[in-house]
Amino acid sequence: MTLVTEALIEEVVRGFYARVRDNPDLGPIFAGAIEDWEPHLAKMMDFWSAVMLSTRRFKGNPVMKHNALGGVTPAHFDTWLGLFRENARDLCPPDIAEEFIRKAEMIAESLKLAKFGLPGVPRVRSAGAPL
Ligand code: HEM
């Protein structure tokens, strides 16, 4: 059995955001929101450590941060997940890649629901949502 390590999490996070920054659809959104990449990468390593290893290291409010981001559509989430899957499968043993992907898909679904609501159902605005 292969174990998830902090070293693997760092590799996955760095690899993923290198792909994101190179992507023509997602790159500009991130470039507009993040000036200094190292603190963001460190935060994302904490986030994935909390998700994959239950370390409770991450402190933040992803729903509020994503609700506040302008110019993001549901299609951007598909692109994000596509890059995430490719990167995880390139860097991790298959069982670990699928665990990363399953968790990313669940979290993406809940961020999307918080940001866009259910199709056809009026959304209750939450703190930080753009008007
Ligand atoms: C269209 C898809 C997405 C875009 C464009 C996006 C963009 C961003 C940006 C620009 C930030 C920095 C916000 C800031 O510091 O002001 C951020 C933070 C973050 N993102 Fe995403 N994101 C996306 C999807 C996801 C998904 C699917 C996950 C999790 C699986 C995720 C997890 C996070 C986390 C944990 C943070 C830190 C939140 C905090 O500081 O409280 N993002 N995202």
Image (cartoon, rainbow, N blue to C red):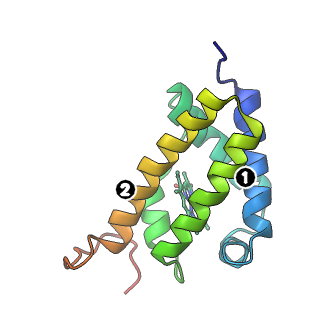
Q: Nearer the viewer, residue 126 or 102?
A: 102
Q: Is residue 104 above or below residue 111?
A: above
Q: Inspect the image, locate mark 2, and give the three-letter code of the amino acid beneath it.
A: Ser
Please indicate whether residue 103 sits to the left or right of residue 88 in the image: left
Q: Residue at x 20, y 79 (%)?
A: 122
Q: Is residue 54 above or below residue 85?
A: above
Q: Nearer the viewer, residue 56 or 122?
A: 122
Q: Quadrant of residue 17?
A: bottom right
Residue where numbered disc 1 is placed: 16
Residue at the farthest left position: 121
Q: Is residue 108 above or below residue 90?
A: below
Relative image position of residue 62 (x, y in whole percent):
47, 56
Relative image position of residue 69 (x, y in whole percent):
52, 75
Q: Residue at x 68, y 70 (%)?
A: 30
Residue where numbered disc 2 is placed: 110
Q: Secondary structure at mark 2?
A: helix
Please indicate whether residue 98 sits to the left or right of residue 4 in the image: left
Relative image position of residue 103 (x, y in whole percent):
48, 41
How far separated are the C-alphas under marks 2 and 1? 20 Å
Q: Quadrant of residue 98?
A: top right
Q: Is residue 58 above or below residue 95?
A: below
Does mark 2's beta carbon lie closer than 8 Å to ligand 1? no
